[in-house]
Amino acid sequence: MLNIIRRLALRHRSFLLACGALLFVFQVVVAAIIASLDLSRTLEGFLVFAPPAIRAIIEQTIPGGSTAGILAFTWNHPVTHALITAIAITFGARAIAGEIENGAIELILAQPLSRMNYFAAQVLFALMSMAFVIFVGLLGAVIGEHAFGLEPFALERLLRLSGNLLLLQMSFYSLTLVCSAFGREGGRVAVLGVLIAIVSYLDNVIATLWNKAAFMKPYSFHTYYDPREILVNGNLGTWPLAVLGVFTLAAIGVAFARFLTRDLP
């Protein structure tokens, strides 16, 4: 199993380092921008001319325009989601369908390696990879806050945020892994994973801004991840963790059951 993880690390190291570096730079640059602006006045002036929809989004995500609120919003920003979700979907799609498509899985499983160990190595590597990129992003946030004189968040809140974000991304990974276990082309599985992530994000945005669509909110993964509530208010209930955790375990179980019984290739 360690050989599989080592092979995956060598294969994807450039991709992971690039995602980590981009998230690190994004957090540092945002801290620099925030430190150079009079946030309350700037935001107030922007809201005067902003369209109603944009104004509603800002008021929902950054109430009061506080520095802490904007720093927390960076962890719900599309850039952050895109960088980490890209890892979840890419690794989920390649784990089975991608390896079947390029013919590598037959050679790998021809070695004295069980399907269980192969599957476990894929899941463990994806988990470690996303945790690594999140850690690098947190490091960038902490360095940026200290370097530009911003009040840093407590370590406990950062750890809660990282755990919640990791579970969110593992949900996307596990669902993509299910599609991968039933598929034969990594590209098609990846496209499906991207569509699921986009629908989840839009579902949460629409349900938040439109009262008539509030019933849709529980059906979005992003509903169970609120950086502002964690970082600013210090609240992280057990329900979001339970929903994301149970779904992830259930989806991984379905993918594993399918992988054990399917024909390869």
Image: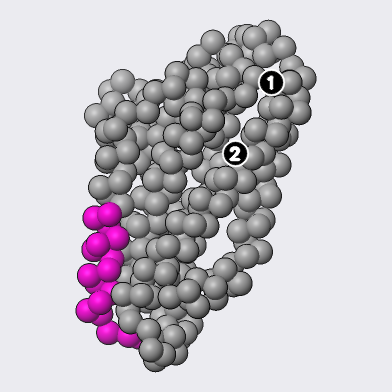
Q: Nearer the viewer, residue 34 or 245?
A: 245
Q: Taking the image as drawn, is residue 176 in sight?
A: yes
**Circles 2 and 1: CB atoms closer than 8 Å:** no
Q: Examine the structure image and report whether residue 225 is included in the region drawn in magenta.
A: no
Image check: 180 left or right of 68?
Answer: left
Q: Taking the image as drawn, is residue 79 in sight?
A: no
Q: Nearer the viewer, residue 133 or 225?
A: 133
Rendering coords of residue 152 (x, y %):
62, 24
* Amino acid found under the numbered disc labelled 1: Leu
Q: Examine the structure image and report whether residue 261 is included in the region drawn in magenta.
A: yes
Q: Which residue is mark 1?
A: 150
Q: Which residue is mark 2?
A: 138
Would you say the magenta stretch is mainly helix, strand or loop? Answer: helix
| Cα separation between marks 2 and 1 | 15 Å
**Looking at the rendering, which quadrant does residue 208 occupy?**
top left
Rendering coords of residue 202 (x, y %):
41, 37
Above or below residue 105? Residue 156 is above
* Amino acid found under the numbered disc labelled 2: Leu
Quadrant including the C terminus: bottom left
Quadrant including the N terminus: bottom left
- Magenta residues (range): 249-265
For marks 2 and 1, the one nearer the N-term is 2
